[in-house]
Amino acid sequence: MFPRGFAWGAATAAYQIEGGWQADGKGPSIWDTFCHEEGRVFQEQDGDVACNSYELWDKDLECIQQLGLTHYRLSLSWARLLPDGTTRHVNQKGVQYYNKVIDDLLASDVSPMVTLYHFDLPQALQDQGGWKSEGIAAIFDSYAMFCFQTFGDRVKLWITINEPSVCAKLGHEDGVHAPGLKEQGTAAYLVGHNMLRAHAMAWHSYDSLFRPEQKGAVSLAINSDWLEPLRPGCEEDEAATGRDLACTLGWFAWPLFVTGDYPEIMRSAIDSQSEKLGYSGSSRLPRFSKDEPAILGTADFFALNYYTSRKVTAGGGRGQMCMKSDRDVEEVLDPSWFICGVSWLAVVPGGLRKLLKYIKDTFGSPAVYITENGFSQVGPVQMEDVRRCELFKDTILEVAKAIEEDGVDVRGYFAWSLLDNFEWADGFSVRFGLFHVDFSDAELRRTAYRSGREYGEMIMKHKRPTDVQ
Ligand code: BGC
């Protein structure tokens, strides 16, 4: 059912698993700062230790081997490598740590997929304006080049930035993620813009300076729900769905894959709302400069994080300067959908298939990696998590159908996550792991859930001996 070379993976992110927040010269990141402020995270928890993967990497590797993964997606902690965010000072201990991780993976026939940025900006850069500052793009580019130079002889799959819309919106509009800003209606668009500029610069650097020798591929991980009209055929709901898709998936995918600029629907939604509010400045959605590297064509594959679906209807509270008013939509859950752990996670396996088809049709049949998909549990731990087993199976079956019946070029699937970990503002209360982590145990023991074991069996059944790249 799955093509040769299909990547069977699991994913993690540095801040969510590593701990060692001050170890061996690491600089602070915005998540260190955010968690240490009162009232930000569930029960004042933080990622100071998390799964302690900084010290217990060997244990993570055992989990990876036990599952038989062909690929492992990890992120680098920018502040562990470059404590103040710039290449002026390199923390060699950080370099050694990731060298070991990468070498151990390769020695186990597991290909690394490496994310350069998964929400954890060095605090020193935040102090200079963070992602809102124009200069961040060039600084990110230097960091990316440093990583390509240092690890690119062995890493062939790169993600520059994970989920720019989440960083932008939750971190700068809603204030529930680091850096905790609530500058509604403006900052998130600026942040998203600078992230696209940063990504494009890094892609061009890779393309001209590293690709000829390293022969890898670079993309940006876009999270998207599948969205469909609440009342199919109803003109208003159809339009609302189009607007919502343009302002979420389209926000990043349109510039990368279609025009090099934001979707027209998105710009006009924002601009018409500005007009209604009597906002007189220039568009709140910035414009790309012709003097900078082009955005179009800077994704070598489509990296998709898919978790859930929504039904969309018109009207989201006009009259305020905020992203919700700009979109002017209401997203609702279908009562038949199973809610898995956290309230936002309505599981809709078929939504993934539809989204994959939509991506194929809209973005020119790109190669797609599903770089995240997963299911959480909350409350008393269930090691025999039969329901999650079914959800993984149902979802992977939909991926198979997308490949076979819809002709989508899906190249891999990464379960989120290898381990239970620090689930951002929800702390350790939400568990997404294939492996349970006992956070009350000094050794932070990892034990496979039933879903982990079954995912491993599925991999065993489907992977072919030549699958390792
Ligand atoms: C993020 C992960 C997160 C997961 C589950 C994704 O948005 O990339 O870091 O843990 O969703 O919420």
Image (tube, helix red, strand yellow):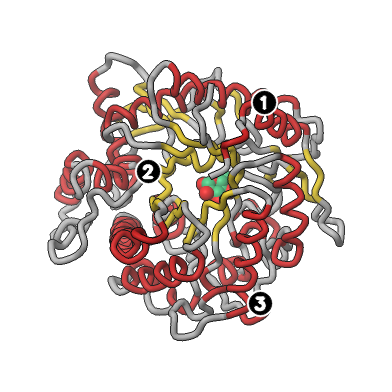
As helix, strand or loop, the secondary structure at mark 1 comes to: helix
* Pointer 3 residue: 22
Q: Residue at x 48, y 38 (%)?
A: 370
Work out whether residue 53 or residue 15 is closer to the camera in this orientation and state it. 53
Mark whose residue sits in front, 1 or 3: 1
Horizontally, residue 415 falls left or right of residue 66, namely left
Q: Quadrant of residue 397?
A: top right
Q: Residue at x 49, y 70 (%)?
A: 150
Horizontally, residue 303 falls left or right of residue 349, namely left
Instruction: Give coordinates of residue 303: x percent, y percent.
Output: 42, 43
Above or below: residue 212 compared with residue 368: below
Q: Amino acid at mark 1?
A: Lys
Q: Measure the alpha-carbon separation of dots 3 and 2.
A: 35 Å
* Pointer 1 residue: 461
Q: Amino acid at mark 2?
A: Phe
Q: Quadrant of residue 388?
A: top right
Label 2 Cα crowd, 10 Å radius (few <14 / some 14-19 / many 20+)? many
As helix, strand or loop, the secondary structure at mark 2 comes to: loop
Give me the disc on residue 301: 2
Mark 3 / mark 2, whichever is N-terminal:
3
Mark whose residue sits in front, 3 or 2: 2
As helix, strand or loop, the secondary structure at mark 3 comes to: loop
Q: Amino acid at mark 3?
A: Gln
Horizontally, residue 50 falls left or right of residue 15, namely right
Instruction: Give coordinates of residue 243: x percent, y percent.
Output: 26, 35
Above or below: residue 94 compared with residue 330: below
Is the residue indicated by label 1 positioned so its CB lies within 8 Å of ligand 1?
no
Instruction: Give coordinates of residue 240: x percent, y percent.
Output: 28, 30
Work out whether residue 395 or residue 66 is closer to the camera in this orientation and state it. 66
Give me the disc on residue 93: none
Label 3 Cα crowd, 10 Å radius (few <14 / some 14-19 / many 20+)? some
